Structures are given as C-alpha cells and as structure tokens.
Amino acid sequence: MRRLILLRHGVTEWNQDRRFQGHEDVPLAPRGRQQAAAAAAHLAALRPSLLWASDLSRARETAGYVAAETGLVPVLDDRLREIDVGDYQGLTHDEARERFGPGPWDYADHGGESNADLAARVCAPVEEAAAALADGATGILAFHGHAIRMATIGFLGWPLEVVSTLGALDNCAWVELTDVPAGSSKSAWRLVAYNAVTPIS
C-alpha cells in the first residue's frame, strides 16, 4: 500500500485575520510553528520517504518541521501554490464582501485562477509524487488548504463541483490517500482521512 499525505501549512497572521493570501508569501505565526512541530512529530511515525512542498514560506516552513523529524530534504514546487485569488489578495473576507458582494467568488473574474485551472496545476505534482513512491512507501506534500481540496478531487477523478461538499481544512490538518489493490493488475487510490489533525494545547 502506498500512502500520500497532503498537509496544509500552519496558521499565519493573515489566516487569523481572515485575509486572502493567495500567492502572497506570508510566514507562519508562532501558533503555526507549534502546529507544524506537532504535526511533524506525528507524521514522522509513518516513516515517509518523500517530502515535497509549495515554495511559499508558510508551506516551506511547515515542511521544514517534517524535514527536521525525518531527515528528508523538501523538494519545492511552485505548482503546489495556493489558488491565485487575483484582486482579492490582501483583503479580509469582510472587505471582499463589501467590494465584490457575497460569495462564492470566482477569482478568475478578477485576475486570478478558476477552480479548474487550480485543479489542473496542483494535480500534476501530486500525480508525479504518487508515481515516485515505491510499494509500501509514504509521501508528504505540504501546501495550501484550497489547493489541497482541489488536488484531492482532481487526483481521485471526482467532478470539480464536489468541492462545495468538502469543508475547509484546518491549519496543519491533512488528507490521507492510500493506494489499495483493487485486483491482480491494477490499483485504486482512495480517500481514507480528511481534515485529520494533531491536537496541541
């Protein structure tokens, strides 16, 4: 059985302010570093052999805690960045509602990406990571909440509209996907955990 862990980064001050981050390079808040350390200690027990991350600092820092626990060197990939929110970047949710009306919002209408564009972008590295895993191996990819939701849906071949039925991922929560043999000649990836998290005090 192969396993993929799609790990959201720890909390940032912009998360705490409910501010759209998109491609803005926002670092972890002190609480986010605590979350990342706790998640890393838990996930290291899975003995991962692969560690990839978005190149944005909040995901890169989160992967750094996993690296410290496992000895792995993170591979940075800008395809794992969060959705480009265009004109929403830097706005709080209240400011966005004042300027653009109630959601759901289509960022592609305001200089950003659509969900379809995001899914195509983030699915490619997830598929490459899966292909790079040996039998029985675990890979961890540290990136961003909405990007992980769309990557999960796209990787499993679900319709993109399913995203509205998936709740937002908590900071430093993860999605777990496993490759369960479905027959003698093929296998199928399955969702076995969503929004799993290591509690911290």
Image (cartoon, rainbow, N blue to C red):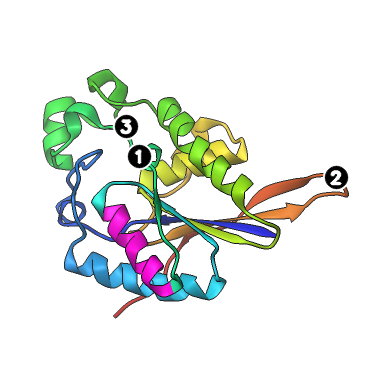
Give x and y (percent) for residue 97.
17, 33
Which is more foreground, mark 3 or mark 1? 1
The tag earlier along the polypeptide, 1 or 2, is: 1
In the picture, measured across the screen, residue 26 lies left or right of residue 7, that is left
Q: Position of residue 162 (x, y in %)?
A: 52, 37
| Mark seen at residue 78 | 1
Residue lying at the far top in this picture: please name it: 109
The structure residue drawn at horizontal position 47% and vertical position 46%, both measured from the top left corner, is: 166
Residue 131, position as x, y percentages in the image: 63, 45
Is disc 1 placed on a helix, strand or loop? Answer: helix
On the image, the x and y values in percent for residue 148 come to 43, 46
Decide which of tag 3 and tag 1 comes sooner along the chain.
Answer: 1
The part of the chain drawn in magenta is 58-69
Distance from Cα at disc 3 to Cα at disc 1:
26 Å
Name the amino acid, label 3.
Pro
Name the residue tied to disc 2: 185
Q: Tell me which label, 2 or 3, sits earlier in the chain.
A: 3
In the picture of the structure, the residue carrying the numbered disc 3 is 104
The local secondary structure at tag 3 comes to: loop
State yes or no: residue 102 in magenta: no
Instruction: Please give the name of the residue rendered at 57% of the width and 41% of the height, measured from the top-left corner.
Output: 127
172 in relation to 107, above or below: below
Q: Nearer the viewer, mark 1 or mark 2?
A: 1
